[in-house]
Image (cartoon, grey):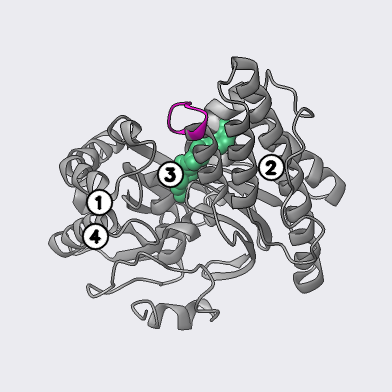
Amino acid sequence: MASDTPTLILGIETTCDETAAAVVERRADGSGRILSNIVRSQIAEHAPFGGVVPEIAARAHVDMLDGIIRAAMQEAGIGFDALDGVAAAAGPGLIGGVIVGLTTAKAIALVHDTPLIAVNHLEAHALTPRLTAPLAFPYCLFLASGGHTQIVAVLGVGDYVRLGTTVDDAMGEAFDKVAKMLDLPYPGGPQVEREAAEGDPARFAFPRPMMGRPDANFSLSGLKTAVRNEAARLQPMEPQDIRDLCAGFQAAVLDVVTDRIEAGLRMFAAQFGPPQALVAAGGVAANRAIRDALQDIAKRAQTPLIVPPPALCTDNGAMIAWAGAERLALGLVDTMDSAPRARWRLDEHGETPAKFANTRARH
Ligand code: KG4
Ligand code: ZN
């Protein structure tokens, strides 16, 4: 493939509760264009349980994926033979869903004789900002979703250093659990944000775990438990109690986010010099109050804040296709024996991209 021709990549995402497929074009100058991006959320299936049920998710992916891929190809207006590669999220995530997506991608790669790219879902979140805006390495990523809360130095494609992570609950998970204990519907993040907007953030003095520590780690389960204890004490609750609990919880999260990211940025600067930007991704980045806090942090750090559009912050196929395109451009492709992984640290290899390719299937 000549290096100056655009590449067309199909991306498949099935690691959690979204069944998604997309076709993305990457041009030789490194810019990208989304030709289609179909996401089918399973929220309705999981809502009665207040969280994602792995078996239900895997079955729904099996039922939906073929149709979603067909729709993505149709909307892009191309046939499978026009593809330069097919990328699937090979982890980390719920293993049943990962198997469905990766196996489907392998079948397409085999039948249409096109390269397979087994993408780390976290890497896809990390690289997606480069799909919609020119953004050079290195940059500092804050990734906060239902499954992950991390601060990562993104140094290049395949070159990541994790600066901080949660030692217990993910941030989105904490929002979801607080919503559940207050009888708010799933997913809880948007509900808690809505209630918080009309609550008094000062009524409850909730803990701010990890604040002031020199590392950039998070801990959210103590905060969640404090909300639970207060909610139990208030029974039966009035609507205003719920609003105040949400406001108090969100205020604590905002303080923690600010303190932890500022610690992460200090670590970044000490090791890699000034970042090109602070970048946020994951469902929690949809929270307006958190976005405002990030804007303040970036301003103080004198670095631009880049937050991809909400549809690209939450799980989708375009981010997988884009990460696949970025890897393919460096010749990083995978073999048919690449394994699906429930766990897969973004920086576990710690090697250069070239070496990284050869160690892909290793656990
Ligand atoms: O990235 P995402 O769509 O899926 C993964 O978990 O990978 O993130 C979903 C998470 C859920 O936990 C949801 O409650 C949270 O993001 N979330 C929010 C908001 N919108 C979604 N959390 C806080 N405030 C929000 N507005
Ligand atoms: Zn995600």
Q: Gap between marks 3 and 4, in whole Å?
A: 17 Å
Q: Residues within 10 Å of mark 1 (few under 14, many from 20)?
A: few
- Magenta span has 281? no
Residue bearing mark 3: 315
Whichever of callouts 1 and 4 sits on the residue coming sooner in the sequence is: 1
User: Which mark's residue is nearer the viewer, 1 or 4?
Assistant: 4
In the rendered image of this protein, does residue 16 appear above or below residue 151?
Answer: above
- Identify the magenta region: 181-188
Residue bearing mark 1: 82
Mark seen at residue 97:
none
**Residue type of the residue flagged with mark 4:** Ile
Q: Considering the numbered disc 3 on the image, is that residue within a helix, a strand or a loop?
A: loop
Residue bearing mark 4: 99
Residue 317: x and y in percent read 37, 46
Give the dominant element type of the magenta stretch: helix, strand or loop: loop
Q: Gap between marks 3 and 2, in whole Å?
A: 22 Å
User: Which mark's residue is nearer the viewer, 3 or 1?
Assistant: 3
Residue bearing mark 2: 253
